[in-house]
Image (spheres, rainbow, N blue to C red):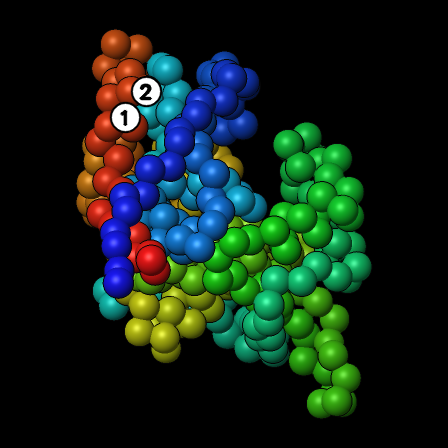
Amino acid sequence: MRHTLPIAPQFYVTAPQPCPYLAGRMERKLFTALQGDYAETLNDALSKQGFRRSQNVLYRPSCAECTACMSARIRVADFTPSRSQKRTIRRNFDLNRRASSPWATEEQFALFRRYLDSRHADGGMADMDIFEFAAMIEETPIRSRIIEYEHRPDDALVRGELAAVCLTDVLDDGLSLVYSFYEPDQSKRSLGTYVILDHVEIAREAGLPYVYLGYWVPGSPKMGYKAGFDALEIYKNGAWQGIGDPDSHTTETHPLSVDPIAEQVARISLPDTLPTKG
């Protein structure tokens, strides 16, 4: 005999703190726990509504006075690399891709520290130690992969030097880049761009329609690069839409135009039922 029960996760709101993307603003996140037998079902559903995963939590920006952060994804079937992106692919022809279960290594952590110290020394992860790094990589209740890019060695039996790493979630409709980092002293390779381009190819080979890139924030230099990818969609006003002209998206929002948390939660579409045995 089979019964069905609704998924009813509890949603919470973080306390306001300084925004890491736009100076002078405060951020606040709406979040829920990601756990249990139906974590993948919930993750798939909420990822389509602008949520992102961090370990066993799903979150979405819910700032009191701003709606600048918008989830972004690439439509794989419509994507065509630009001329500069084609050059990036050629510059990295010598990298091997290796995908495995999410397991942290000392080599990954060493690369992670070099990346942070060079690119994000004042960011929220700046003080992360190896145990916190391992938790970020390994604590996942859904199907995740760690994808490593290494220099191709002369000896095929020897692993090459690590150049880039990406923690990737496999959704029912695409790949989600949870976090990526790379060798900071190889700027000519454009490794961050290459990782995204390679994920588009992985998704294409797997027949998955989207590659989720996290949040695009107009006006933020840290996030501006995402607008340079073809076939980019953003989640805005409760729906996915083509980005169009990136300059047409304002970062200004009057406080009264931001809906109360209760209304935001009420509009979240949850999976209808859960199969259970009984």
What residue is shown with label 2? 261
Which amino acid type corresponds to the residue marked 2 in the rendered image?
Ile
| Camera-side residue of 154 and 141 | 141
Above or below, 76 relative to 35: below
| Camera-side residue of 71 and 47 | 47
Q: What element carries label 2?
A: helix
* Quadrant containing the N terminus in the rendered view: bottom left
Residue 269 position within the rendered picture, expressed as x and y whole percent measured from the top left: 24, 40
Label for residue 264?
1
Q: In which quadrant of the rendered view does residue 41 lie?
A: bottom left
For this orientation, the residue located farthest to the top is 256
Which amino acid type corresponds to the residue marked 1 in the rendered image?
Gln
| Camera-side residue of 236 and 4 | 4
- Residue depicted at 27% across the width and 26% down the height: 264
- Locate residue 210 relative to residue 18 in the image: left or right: left
For this orientation, the residue located farthest to the bottom is 156
Above or below, 56 relative to 20: below
- Residue depicted at 40% across the width and 31% down the height: 10
* Quadrant containing the C terminus in the rendered view: bottom left
Q: Distance between the residues labelled 2 and 1?
A: 5 Å
Label for residue 199?
none
Dot 1 crowding, Cα within 10 Å, few <14, some 14–19, many 20+: few
Residue 49 position within the rendered picture, expressed as x and y whole percent measured from the top left: 29, 42
- Marks 2/1 in contact by CB < 8 Å: the verdict is yes
- Locate residue 108 relative to residue 57 in the image: left or right: right
Residue 238 position within the rendered picture, expressed as x and y whole percent measured from the top left: 21, 35
- Locate residue 17 relative to residue 159 in the image: left or right: left
Q: In which quadrant of the rendered view does residue 220 lie?
A: top left
User: Do we see residue 12 in this rendering?
Assistant: yes
Q: In which quadrant of the rendered view does residue 109 lie?
A: bottom right
User: Do we see residue 189 in this rendering?
Assistant: no
Above or below, 149 relative to 18: below
